[in-house]
Image (spheres, rainbow, N blue to C red):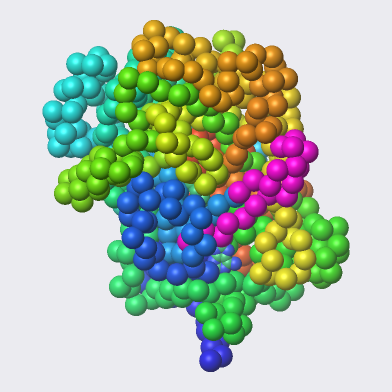
Amino acid sequence: MKETHEFDYVIVGAGAAGCILANRLSANGRYSVLLLEAGGEARNFWIPIPAGFSKLMTNRAFNWGFHTEPEANTLDRTIAVPRGKGLGGSTLINGMIYVRGTRQDYDGWVNQGAAGWAYDQVVPYFDKIENYNQASYANETQAISRQIKEREGSAFEYAARGNTGPMHINEVGERFPLSTAFLQAAQEHGLPRNSDYNIADQEGVGYYQVLQKNGRRWSVADGYLTPARRRRNLHIRTHAHVLRVNLQGKRCVGLTYRDRSGETQDVTSRIETILAAGAIQSPHLLELSGIGRPDCLDKVGIQVNHALQGVGENYIDHFCTRMNWRIKNTQTLNELSRGPNLVAAVAKYFLQRRGILSLGTGLVYGFIKSRFDISLADVQLFFVHASYANAADRKLDREPGMTIGVSQLRPKSKGTIHVKNADPLCPPAIKPNFLDEQEDKDCLIGGMQAVRRIVQQQALQKFIDHEINPGAQVQRYDEWLDFARRNGQTIYHPVGTCRMGQDEAAVVDHKLRVRGLTGLRIVDASIMPTIVSGNTQAAVMMIAEKGADLILSDAPK
Ligand SMILES: Cc1cc2nc3c(=O)[nH]c(=O)nc-3n(C[C@H](O)[C@H](O)[C@H](O)COP(=O)(O)OP(=O)(O)OC[C@H]3O[C@@H](n4cnc5c(N)ncnc54)[C@H](O)[C@@H]3O)c2cc1C
């Protein structure tokens, strides 16, 4: 059935940003808001269970399942680029790790033309998002806390953080002999035990903070959409795949989407259309609408409606290599997640919401320096007492193992994402250009070498059988680089493809308005001028909270 509708605000994509926008723009009841999402409701057994992460990596109902183009820097491999689909977007399938990034990240944005986005100006938005109640969490788990103190000598010192916001954040509560030994080894290596990497200097090691409530995934739909769904001015349409935005001259007047029955529907936005489709699909949608680089559009026969050189450029992502070891003298997830151990783990999870099923991708973090002569940590570590036969599809080894993911925090290499053809249902060409800059190669290799030194410390020695990957034979720079090129993957943080700034190549201005057009904003991961130091969900949520304020401050009174 053909439907034409008018709304004040039309939001494309119900992910980390879109759910927050839908909540905030509909909150005062004055504006009608339509939220369009290509996926469906978040109904799947594995979504709320943190360990269900691995099951969702290949589920096409909740994962768009993009891939990169083959590129020489990564030896012509195609690398999987998962992206979440459904109400909650990538927060339905992601690793739940919560990292704000550093003061330098956001102050750096200002230097690139993003006025108003300095660290001190964005911190109130992080506080507004967070329900970080580590003190009460520690009370609930007092016995464990005491044990940790005794074993690791760490004090529970938690500085003020947002503790009344919609997103529940806890420090991982599970402890294992191998993770304790890793923390001790890192300290023997000279790294500090950092009690909160989200308030000051990131450098150090400790347990990750994760977006969970009572052992369950807490998606942005849980935090922001569910409480807003009863509002009569908020309209949500699922299985609505937006095909293009529509311009009249230089004004965006709405969009066209394909509904679940395959019919196209037109929607008019009276005030604004807001793209929140993420760093892969927001630039793709602009190009499909004739907004972008004329050379890219001409090549595929799309008429240029508005030339913008920066669309689909400045693709930045975190590239991660996974080092792993065969382990002895203790159990790892490889065995704990099989046979009778798995039965016990399932029972523990459903009775207490604890145990290995409450673990996502992150257990222990490290923020370390790849060289001694720099002031800020430039490498992030992801320690887990498990090893994968295949990291891309997350199949665990049968023998005991340990993995440390190594990722450069602020890569300089930049890639692109552009339309392959004019068919809106054809995925775009993703070319991340990983490991292009010399600084990135040096940093990643320095990080991996530092990790090898940490693992050689006394505290871990009784558990290490041997290094599997890259293997002790890898010693020279070119051998490390070959390992990275051959094995590195994305850790799923593409950003920057509709960059905010003031220069000619910027796509949106500091108020997130598409440059040269009216009635169109972009509010999602794509607007970051540079990538933040760590996992990107927290920064995207902050962008959406601030974006909603900017939109409402410009709303007709
Ligand atoms: C597997 C995985 C693991 C990750 N792990 C972590 C982690 O542990 N910690 C962390 O901080 N970050 C993590 N991230 C990154 C984080 O989830 C993203 O940075 C964040 O969700 C991006 O938010 P967004 O709003 O820009 O896009 P998304 O959350 O991806 O939302 C975009 C939404 O738009 C919809 N959409 C797209 N195109 C259209 C269209 N044409 N029409 C209608 N709807 C459309 C999509 O279906 C989706 O729902 C991970 C991401 C993935 C994929």
Residue 244: x, y in percent? 66, 71
Q: Nearer the viewer, residue 433 or 79?
A: 79
- Is residue 200 at least partly visible in the picture? no
Residue at horizontal 67%, vertical 61%?
427
Residue 229 in the figure: left or right of residue 298:
left
Total labels: the figure holds: 0
- Is residue 302 at least partly visible in the picture? yes
Residue 173 in the figure: left or right of residue 413:
left
Residue 253: x, y in percent? 63, 75
Q: Is residue 66 magenta?
A: yes
Instruction: From the image, give the main secondary structure of the stretch colored magenta.
Output: loop
Residue 3: x, y in percent? 54, 88
Residue at horizontal 64%, vertical 17%?
474
Residue at horizontal 61%, vertical 49%?
80
Residue 92: x, y in percent? 42, 55
Q: Nearer the viewer, residue 359 or 340?
A: 340
Query: Relative to 409, does residue 123 appear above or below in the rendering?
Result: below
Query: Relative to 358, does residue 142 appear above or below in the rendering?
Result: above
Query: Relative to 360, does residue 524 appear above or below in the rendering?
Result: below
Residue 245 in the figure: left or right of residue 290:
left
Residue at horizontal 67%, vertical 74%?
246
Image quarter of residue 153? top left
Residue range highlighted in magenta? 62-80
Q: Nearer the viewer, residue 199 or 297?
A: 297
User: Which residue is outermost to the bottom?
Assistant: 1
Q: Is residue 512 magenta?
A: no
